[in-house]
Amino acid sequence: MKEIKAISDDQYDQLYAINERDMDGEYGRMGKAVNSEVFLKLNTTTNDLSASPKHIEVIVRNFEDNIIDEDKFIDTLSLFGKKPDDFGYD
């Protein structure tokens, strides 16, 4: 949306700052209130930790291109049982 100028830089920053995986945050509370069972299934890490190399490459590229910050990089990789040092980052 930011790329097509549908939202401002400030709106992008505000939306990006939301931790969508925080079950006690605003998003988590709303999701659980609407349909707790489905929301928890969609937002709980499963035992299936696989991802295609192409998808992992996109995550790494987004970090390298400063599209995601270090914290988001670490959080996203952790969903797949990976760490930044698996890709040569400290």
Image: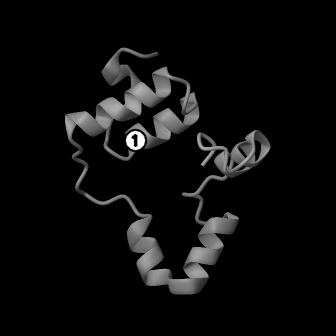
Viewer-closest of 68 and 36: 68
Residue 55, picture quadrant: top left
Mark 1 secondary-structure assignment: helix
Q: Is residue 11 left or right of residue 53?
A: right
Residue at 64% in and 74% down: 29
Q: Where is residue 25 in the image (x, y as percent from the top left)?
A: 67, 63
Residue 27, compared with residue 30, is above or below; it is above
Number of numbered labels in the structure image? 1
User: What residue is shown with label 1?
Assistant: 78
Residue at 60% in and 49% down: 1
The amino acid type, in three-letter code, at marker 1 is Ser
Q: In this view, does 34 lie to the left or right of 52?
A: right
Q: Is residue 44 left or right of residue 35?
A: left
Q: Where is residue 42 in the image (x, y as percent from the top left)?
A: 40, 68
Q: How crowded is mark 1: few (under 14 residues within 10 Å), some or many (20 or more)?
A: some
Q: Can residue 14 be seen in this view?
A: yes
Residue 56, compared with residue 27, is above or below; it is above
